[in-house]
Image (tube, rainbow, N blue to C red):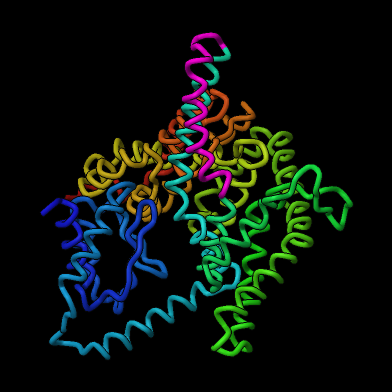
Amino acid sequence: MSKYHDLAVNILGAIGGRANVTEYTHCMTRLRVTVVDRSRIAEADLKQIEGVLGVVDDETYQVILGPGVVTKVAEEFGKVLEASGPEGDPSTSAEQLQAKGAQMKAQLKKKNDTPFKNFLRKIGNIFIPLIPAFVGAGLIAGIGSILTNNMTAGNLDTATWQQYVTILNVIKNAIFSYLVIYVGINAAKEFGATPALGGVIGGVTLLTGVTADLTITNIFTGTPLTPGQGGVIGVLIAVWILSIVERYLRKVIPDAVDIIVTPTIALLAVGLITIFFIMPFAGFISSNLIGAINWTLEVGGAFSGFVLGTAFLPLVMLGLHQVLTPIHIEMINDSGMTLLLPMLAMAGAGQVGASIALWIRCKKNKSLTNMIKGALPVGILGIGEPLIYGVTLPLGRPFVTACIGGGIGGAVIGLFGNVGAIAIGPSGVALIPLIANGLWLKYVIGLIAAYAGGFIATYLFGTPKEAMAEQE
């Protein structure tokens, strides 16, 4: 058996066994498990398992494993669940466990059940599955840009290397050119529509078949619509409307003709609404939103960077950061890069600096320093959850000083200006290859400033006395 299989077995045992799991999924860094009874989770034992970087007790119970590892462990976790079969519990019946679990889940859901947070959670669920594609395609685009720059500078022969750049662009365009279709499919899953119909509505915004000789006019401005106008914002609105229309049709269309009539009417109605109303409206919103953000960053400079770098982790804690994902994507579609991401990435760098300061000042606290040693490498690579939930947040003050460090790094990036990323997904050192226009050195200087800011603020003001006490 592999180490990933053993890790999956140990995790399952610590969270209460097969009888305590109803379903599971995973994102880039976390195994997300829906459990029946949270009181059956041995959280202390779970945190001690080698390979587990931390846990987050949210609507789903989340085990932080890190990128790459989580995919392999999730696959093994499914195999272990299937192999274990139904598991009885001599002390508690399945019905009792389910009833208790349903009650606890309802209480937790009620706590976080606000319309705004639910909306943001859906937005996150739409884009999280696409992040590996963004990262891979972004890095391929970066390689293509490096080759193009070298051809322009005369370092490479254009006749020889242009074909390779073209091939790289074909691979990169497979996600970015048809992104609205992927978003439409995922949005349909979240909003309760048929995924294939969501993909079609996303594809409608590409205006396939419209040419310079045959245009569609914007009914508000009288100007021709452009393919992709409104971007993913328009797709989200359109697929949400699709879900409403489709649910209504399912209620009134007889079952015998539902498979024929419902998708036809839904696509025709929502397709027309998308072309003539949503695309012009979303295009107006998108262009003005991106323009306002760019203007703010240009005028605000270092101050804007400081605010963004400082505030990002509190936004993450509140679950409000999800709303930024469509904005990042629209900025990339508009200008080829997002100026927000490098500034926001400084927040994680501040956590790294703060954790190094705690490591030095709390040498006698063996449990804390061991946690830092395990979480620091992935923190430098941009996976900040282990440091946040395992180190700085539980101690209180270090979380605040780490945010200040992130603000300092963000201010440096803002002072430089025009430092953007060509794709979303990574942060920290892992974001360096995705920095646009060869400005990676400025980004690295920002990282160093955030490390230093988080370190100094935490070393001088953010280390609790109790954390420095001797502990095993």
Residue 245, compared with residue 432, is above or below; it is below
Of the pair 331 and 160, the residue shown nearer to us: 160
Outermost residue toward the left? 1
Q: Quadrant of the N terminus?
A: bottom left
Task: Let me know if residue 159 is in the magenta part.
Answer: yes
| Most distant residue in the right direction | 222
Instruction: Give the camera-side residue of 265 and 4.
Output: 265
What residue lies at 74% left-to-right and 38% top-to-bottom? 295
Q: Horizontal and vertical percent for residue 91? A: 15, 87
Which residue is found at the position 20% from the left and 71% from the top? 82
Please tell me whether residue 34 is drawn above or below residue 159 in the rendered image. Answer: below
On whether residue 454 falls in the magenta region, the answer is no
The residue located at (37%, 44%) in the rendering is 463
**Dominant secondary structure of the magenta stretch?**
helix
- Extreme-top residue of the structure: 154
**Which percent across, then down, holds residue 360?**
29, 35
Residue 405 visible in the picture: no
Horizontal arrangement in the rendering, residue 71 relative to residue 46 (left or right): right
**Rendered location of residue 401, percent (x, y):** 47, 43
Give percent across and percent down for residue 255: 54, 88
Q: Residue at horizontal 38%, vertical 85%? A: 103
The answer to whether any part of residue 193 appears in the image is yes
Instruction: Give above or below for 455 relative to 371.
Output: above
Q: How many marks?
A: 0
First to last magenta residue range: 153-178
Q: Nearer the viewer, residue 371 or 224?
A: 224
